[in-house]
């Protein structure tokens, strides 16, 4: 391990510990992230073949590109996802307030990226989520101001301003419901 890799790993562990993850949970998340990263590399393929999943039975196979044969292999993706879900559930249960509306403000969310060129696992903290919601709220305010200042024959007509307002409202609803996690996942804590 090089010095930059060590510093990156130490920074990641420090950030996760600051968010309330136990050392054993951090190790589990890191192991699951490495497993998923390798799995997604194999899904993209190597010189010898690639991993395929049967759409009917959901079983995984190694497709050998040289012989054309499909051999069954263990499904490592499902196990890694289950370990991540268990760790996230335990962490979120420890910090869950009694008020259900406030639960969203203490909840960490996981984002799994299937592109093998990047980190496979990102943890979005309440800070990232509330910052994203605030930026969507600002977008809505700007759109409402444009609607209030729109002129019938100006550069921005009331109709186009109303479309902007409707889009901003939808984006704010999606942000509050955590439906658009992929739009700001790159701001999370990368687990290498």
Image (cartoon, grey):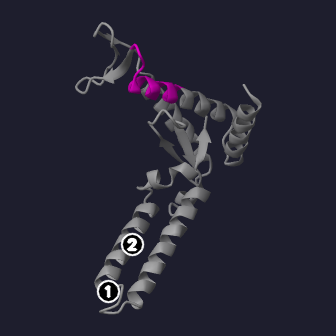
Q: Main secondary structure of the magenta part?
A: helix
Task: Categorize mark 1 by other alpha carbons within 10 Å: few (<14), some (14-19), many (20+).
Answer: some
* Contact, mark 1 vs mark 2 (Cβ under 8 Å): no
Magenta-tinted stretch:
35-48
Among the two numbered marks 1 and 2 on one chain, the one whose residue lies closer to the N terminus: 1
Residue 55 picture quarter: top left
Please report the residue visible at 38 percent of the width from the left and 86 percent of the height from the top. Answer: 147
Q: Name the residue under label 2.
A: 169
How far from the left and from the top, in percent, is residue 57? 25, 23
Tell me the element at label 2: helix
Please identify the quadrant where the N terminus is shown. top right
Magenta includes 101?
A: no
Which residue, given by chain and number where applicable, does mark 1 sit on?
157
Q: State the image coordinates of residue 16 (x, y, percent, origin top left).
A: 67, 43
- Asked whether residue 64 appears in the rendered view, the answer is yes
Q: Give the residue drawn at x 77%, y 31%.
A: 3
Tell me, yes or no, if residue 108 can be seen here. Answer: no
Q: Which residue is drawn at 37% across and 19% down?
A: 50
**Left or right: where 49 falls relative to 132:** left
Foreground label between 1 and 2:
1
Q: Is residue 164 above or below residue 23?
A: below
Residue 160, compared with residue 190, is above or below; it is below
């Amino acid at each position: 391990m090089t010095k930059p890799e060590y510093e990156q790993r130490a920074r990641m562990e420090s950030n996760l510990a600051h968010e309330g993850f136990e050392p054993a949970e951090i190790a589990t998340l890191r192991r699951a992230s490495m497993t998923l990263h390798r799995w997604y590399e194999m899904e993209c393929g190597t010189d010898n073949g690639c991993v395929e999943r049967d759409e009917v039975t959901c079983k995984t196979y190694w497709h050998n590109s040289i012989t054309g044969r499909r051999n069954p292999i263990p499904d490592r993706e499902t196990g890694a996802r289950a370990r991540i879900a268990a760790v996230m559930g335990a962490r979120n249960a420890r910090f869950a307030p009694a008020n259900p509306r406030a639960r969203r403000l203490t909840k960490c969310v996981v984002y799994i990226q299937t592109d093998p060129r990047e980190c496979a696992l990102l943890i979005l903290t309440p800070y990232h989520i509330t910052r994203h919601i605030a930026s969507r709220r600002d977008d809505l305010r700007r759109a409402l101001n444009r609607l209030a200042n729109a002129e019938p024959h100006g550069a921005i007509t009331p109709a186009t301003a109303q479309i902007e307002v409707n889009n901003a409202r939808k984006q704010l609803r999606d942000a509050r419901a955590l439906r658009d996690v992929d739009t700001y996942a790159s701001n999370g804590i990368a687990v290498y």
